[in-house]
Amino acid sequence: MAKRWYVVHAYSGYEKHVMRTLIERIALEGMEDQFGEILVPTEEVVEMRDGKKRKSERKFYPGYVLVQMEMDDGTWHLVKNTPRVLGFIGGTKDKPAPITEREADAILRRVESGVDKPKPKTLFEPGEVVRVIEGPFADFNGVVEEVDYDKSRVKVAVLIFGRSTPVELEFGQVEKD
């Protein structure tokens, strides 16, 4: 039987705990050959705090754990009876349905691309009003004109002496209004 990807619903905030517990229980039961990867899909995000770049993890699907497994009564019971697991997503209560290969590939690709390039925690859009919080234009409001995620910079049109002036700032120097 081929291993397929299933989505397991876990208590929110306990996804990593459920993943570790599942790995331990699989090893204790000697069922390693019936299970593949177990993962919590996350991406690395960068935020500015106290003037420093800090990296943290953000979950794509909070409350869910992806499990690659062969579905039979034994594996179903092992997962279902793991603490802080609410059940499977998809299919019926007693016969869960796997996600399609295409869905699984899309999730895995997103996880891998998130490792290479951390994303900013706050996303800015052109036309959005922001407030400058540090630098020579502190306390000015402005409208976002351009966003450069590669350089973590944003071009903001700030009203100075009644004239709109474009100013280039780092993400950490502005906040959403």
Image (cartoon, helix red, strand yellow):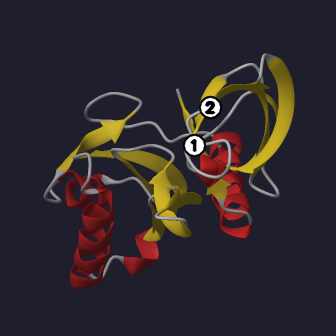
Q: Nearer the viewer, residue 108 or 78?
A: 108
Which percent across, then down, holds residue 157? 80, 28
- Please state which of residues 153 and 104 is positioned toward the viewer in this rendering: 153
Q: On the image, numbered disc 2 is attached to which residue?
A: 140
Residue 68 seen from this side: no
The image quarter containing residue 114 is bottom right
| Secondary structure category for the residue under label 2 | loop
Asked if labels 1 and 2 touch by Cβ distance under 8 angstroms, the answer is no
Mark seen at residue 72:
none
Q: Nearer the viewer, residue 164 or 48?
A: 164
Image position of 141 with respect to 13: above or below: above
Rendering coords of residue 70 (x, y %): 45, 59
**Amino acid under disc 2:** Phe
Residue positioned 84% across, 19% down in the render: 163
Residue at the spot 57% in from the left edge and 43% down from the top edge: 122
At horizontal 40% and vertical 29% (from top left) the residue drawn is 91
Crowding near the residue tagged with mark 1, few <14, some 14–19, many ≥20 C-alpha atoms within 10 Å: few
Q: Nearer the viewer, residue 59 or 148?
A: 148
Sequence-wise, the earlier of marks 2 and 1 is: 1
Residue at 82%, 56% (x, y): give it.
Answer: 150
Please identify, in this view, whether the residue under mark 2 or under mark 1 is nearer the observer.
Answer: 2
Disc 2 residue crowd, few under 14, some 14–19, many 20+, Cα 10 Å: some
Q: Is residue 23 above or below residue 74?
A: below
Q: Amino acid at mark 1?
A: Thr
Residue 72: image location, x then y, percent: 34, 54
Label 2 to label 1: alpha-carbon separation: 19 Å
Vertical relation: 169 (above or below) 15? above
Instruction: Name the secondary structure under disc 1.
Output: loop
